[in-house]
Amino acid sequence: MGETYMTRAGYEKLVKELEMLKQRKQELSLEIGETREQGDLRENAGYHFAREKQSETLRRIAEIENRLSGAKIIDDMNLPKGEVIIGMKVTIREVGTTDDYEYTLVGAEESDPASGRISVHAPIAQGLLGHHVGDEVAVNLPGGQTKFKVLKIEPSI
């Protein structure tokens, strides 16, 4: 996997989740052993449920380990000033309106659109990347092309 950009907080959140999942993996192994002792595995719903949970847990562990292995931590120290990039809070206005929007560009793992944290892979973020205050940007959104003016850019970390 390639590089995954994330904040220090996002990285630490993944590390905590990984630790929790590894603990869960051990618990599931014990549970599988206990349910295996209950007899015929073809009729043992508890065994099959535990195996399914173990499979999901192992898949998520591999996914997180993959992301962490390619993680590049972003912080205030290495963010270029005045340019829309990951880790920046951007205030934009839809051209021809008084509607302002504020977004923080983050890695996919940290995305939470309800709180204004959008993935750098989101269409609006892709359209804004590399632009500066005062730029008018045409962004291709699912509903069509929309023009925005970049009003403010500031570090969010």
Image: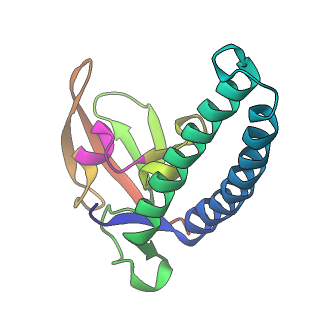
Residue 87 visible in the current orientation: no
Whether 155 is drawn above or below 24: the answer is: below
Find the magenta span and give its range.
119-126
Q: Quadrant of the C terminus?
A: bottom right
Whether 74 is drawn above or below 137: the answer is: below
Using residue 43 as the reference point, say whether residue 153 is left or right of it: left
Whether 56 is drawn above or below 146: the answer is: below
Q: Position of residue 82 (x, y in %)?
A: 33, 71
Whether 56 is drawn above or below 90: the answer is: above
Residue, far bottom: 77
Task: Tell me what residue is drawn at x 41 percent, y 58 percent.
Answer: 152
Instruction: Give whichever of 131, 118 is nearer the camera.
Output: 118
> Is residue 121 one of those drawn in magenta?
yes
Residue, far front: 39
Colouring: rainbow
> Is residue 63 one of those drawn in magenta?
no
Residue, far top: 43
Q: Quadrant of residue 85?
A: bottom left
Task: Tell me what residue is drawn at x 55 percent, y 39 percent.
Answer: 55
Residue 48 visible in the current orientation: yes
Number of dots carrying numbers: 0
Q: Quadrant of residue 95?
A: top left
Q: Quadrant of the N terminus?
A: bottom left
Q: Position of residue 74 (x, y in %)?
A: 44, 74
Task: Tell me what residue is drawn at x 53 percent, y 65 percent.
Answer: 156
Task: Tell me what residue is drawn at x 44 percent, y 31 percent.
Answer: 99
Q: Position of residue 125 (x, y in %)?
A: 32, 46
Q: Position of residue 132 (x, y in %)?
A: 26, 62
Instruction: Give whichever of 43, 154 is nearer the camera.
Output: 43
